[in-house]
Image (spheres, rainbow, N blue to C red):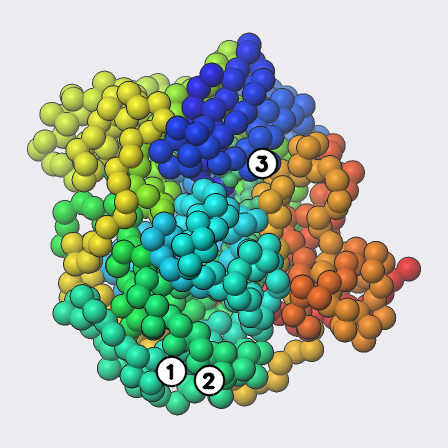
Amino acid sequence: MASRICPLCEACCGLEITVEGDRLTRIRGDEHDVLSHGFICPKGAALDELHDDPDRLRAPLIKRDGAFVAVSWDEAFAEIERRLPPILAAHGANSVATYAGNPTAHKAGLLLYGTRLTRAIGTANAFSASTLDQMPKQLASGWMYGHWLSVAVPDLARTDLLVVLGANPIASNGSMWTVPDFRGKAKAMQARGGKLVVIDPRRTETAALADQHHFVRPGSDAFLLLAIVHTLFAEELVNLGRLAPHVAGVDEVRAVVREVSPELVADRCGMSATTIRELARMLASTPRAALYGRIGTCTQAYGTLASWLIDVINALTGHLDEVGGVMFPRSAAFAANTAPGKGKGITTGRRRSRVSGAPEVFGELPITCLAEEIETAGDGQVRALITIAGNPVLSAPNGPRLAAALASLELMISLDIYLNETSRHAHVILPGYSSLADPHFDVAFPQLAWRNTARYSEPLVAAPAGHPAEWELLVRLIGIVRGRGAAVDVAALDDELAADDVRRVAGPMTEAILGAVTSRGPDRLFDLALRAGPYGLTLDRVRAAPHGLDLGELAPRIPELLRTPSGKVELAPAALIADVARARAELASPTPPLVIIGRRHLRSNNSWMHNLPTLASGHFRGTALVHPADAARLSLVAGGRARISREGRSIDVDVELTDDMMPGVVSLPHGWGHDQPGTQLSVARQRPGANLNAILGDDLRDPLSGNAVLGGVAIEMQPIA
Ligand SMILES: Nc1nc2c(c(=O)[nH]1)N[C@H]1C(S)=C(S)[C@@H](COP(=O)(O)OP(=O)(O)OC[C@H]3O[C@@H](n4cnc5c(=O)[nH]c(N)nc54)[C@H](O)[C@@H]3O)O[C@H]1N2
Ligand SMILES: Nc1nc2c(c(=O)[nH]1)N[C@H]1C(S)=C(S)[C@@H](COP(=O)(O)OP(=O)(O)OC[C@H]3O[C@@H](n4cnc5c(=O)[nH]c(N)nc54)[C@H](O)[C@@H]3O)O[C@H]1N2
Ligand code: SF4
Ligand SMILES: [Mo]
């Protein structure tokens, strides 16, 4: 029996797993885990089915004459060496794109070495799921605090009011906020007299727990938030508290919201002006309060604006960087905001995408630009793609167009554990083995966690004989890209990569630092990062605590955390002040009668856990939720089928009626559509569901962050036999 960090979602629960031979015989929440204290959800409990899934790939595959054949590792890499270097030589670095999917964040080997692969290629065409997700939040945080991962999270353990906008943590278990057992913590807040308020176009599982729920029109959050800021100024409720000397730009914010009254936005938001004012007063008058927004506020045309305004409101009501408000975790390793450094701030647009001219943000281009970069001939055209734990055919908008583009690539390599809707287009698939055979340390999530901890997971099962770790696969790819060939000495190249990294920050101290660390691979990087971190830990010290080291509650960090050039919280970044005008111009346009949004279920995880029998069983979850009034208007019936169409593309769905939906809004989960030919997903295929992203458009994005618009778009819906 050993403790293991669950690799499936951002809650990062510590699980206690019993292994007998190669079988996981018992999985429970680790009650001694310093972060999660015993919490587990049905996905974590199904890790055994993932481990045993006969469809999970065990050997590399090469496509020969249109069919995949299992080959040896040496054959797979020989194929890549034969095909990849000539493309780079003839067409340059930008001809090879990379796409990193969501599980990359949960697998340290993929995260740390995937970034190095992209750097080794030197391509501008770096894409990831971040532009389907949280890029607006990172950009807003970067502009305000000076670093991309300085993201403030609610101090739920001590707050008396949590307002949740566009998030459903009861189903998602929290996002950009590592908060295992959200329900338990929210209930504890209510038990001490605190209030939970949810603002969402659907009365969600989280709303069911809340003291108040308000519907909001999809995509209108920025207007709601502008009107709340307006009210704070108009009613003289602004109180920066301790932060006053550290905040710049209050006057610019006041000026930009002057005309955005609650009355002006009420129709657009589908919320009364009175409710908007009451929300502002409640946030201002509660000494310990936190406003938290997540994916619903990001995946829309004003995602960066909304993400920024959330923090503006927290700051103006005196809740930013305060106990019981929102605070910045202090991570033990890998956090740029804990390293001593000058405030350089962040930069975007250092380059632009070739076809649409979309600006680079945080080193990447919008995923909605990938298809056109493959399709459009010319210098810099993408001819090869390496996907790392991603399934953009289902997870990115206009999946059918992307699938056709992938089919036209000269070379596609997928690091993936399944033959699925995306990897079926690959020429070579390199599967990782069960993640439980890898050591693990969370690189990113402690920067977003409800409490400061440091945890390490030892490998729980033995790696299959001869099967390289995923980081070793990536080092071999780096070897090929660097002209060292498929037979590159992985250990030697890993030494060089580590030395390069350390030299960049430590210069002449490099040899001494490297000499102090004995481990190799990801372990070496964990150890180096812990030693450089703010608690001066070592990997051995973290390892000696099987349930993790508790590093204490969150504590105020401003001004120490700030890395803006001014050394202040930038409350009014120029690009955001300017973007208010774009939003205001849209206020005049009519509200479509029917729009679609997404949804998450506890037993599903984006596109890829639908092949596990326990999770897939029971009531089918990929239904379209429709309000009865809309159903009556459109002649839709409960349990019937309907066609949803948008701009000439359509999908067919099962209809479920519920007054949990805001009238005029339909909800359909993403990640379904497992009926494509040539995949190996025998369980998922039985109830494939429809792919929401087949009808969403890749032409819609937030121009600042490049994030895709995944909700609030107009659809038509009609019954089918
Ligand atoms: N319409 C709509 N679309 C959305 C969203 C939405 O809310 N609405 N949400 C978006 C969000 S937030 C995200 S993060 C994206 C996710 O987008 P993606 O990351 O592209 O998609 P996932 O479904 O997470 O696919 C994960 C892939 O990783 C593979 N995988 C799983 N474990 C491992 C492993 O250990 N090693 C390797 N090598 N591969 C592994 C799986 O087989 C699968 O192919 O989807 C986005 N798409
Ligand atoms: N079980 C499970 N857990 C997951 C995932 C999963 O697929 N399944 N995915 C993981 C990933 S990759 C992520 S990024 C996180 C996301 O975590 P969350 O952000 O909590 O994601 P959702 O559950 O999709 O909640 C988003 C909510 O926003 C609402 N919404 C939609 N449009 C709007 C809008 O315009 N305005 C407002 N105010 N609300 C809107 C939706 O109705 C929904 O209730 O979850 C992670 N955890
Ligand atoms: S909430 Fe569930 S899936 Fe997420 S980390 Fe915890 S056990 Fe794993
Ligand atoms: Mo995500």
The residue shown at (30%, 79%) is 237
Residue most toward the front?
A: 192
| Residue type, label 2 | Pro
Q: Secondary structure at mark 1?
A: helix
* Up/down of 521 relative to 295, above or below: above
Q: How many marks?
A: 3
The residue shown at (48%, 51%) is 187
For residue 43, the mark is: 3
Q: Is mark 2 within 8 Å of ligand 2?
A: no
Confirm whether residue 367 shows in the render.
no
| Residue type, label 3 | Lys
Q: Is mark 3 within 8 Å of ligand 3?
A: yes
Q: Secondary structure at mark 2?
A: helix
Tag 1 residue: 231
The residue shown at (68%, 73%) is 664
For residue 435, the mark is: none
10 Å crowding of disc 2: few (<14), some (14-19), many (20+): many
* Contact between labelled residues 3 and 2, with CB atoms less than 8 Å apart: no
Mark 1 or mark 3, whichever is nearer to me: 1
Looking at the picture, tell me which residue is in the foreground, 550 or 693: 550
In this rendering, position of residue 592 left or right of residue 176: right
* Contact between labelled residues 1 and 2, with CB atoms less than 8 Å apart: yes
Q: Position of residue 390 (x, y in %)?
A: 54, 42
Q: Position of residue 23 (x, y in %)?
A: 58, 15
Asked where in the image residue 288 lies, by quadrant, the reply is bottom left
Alpha carbon distance from label 1 to label 3? 42 Å
10 Å crowding of disc 1: few (<14), some (14-19), many (20+): many
Asked where in the image residue 41 lies, by quadrant, the reply is top right
Tag 2 residue: 262
Dot 2 or dot 3: first in sequence order is 3
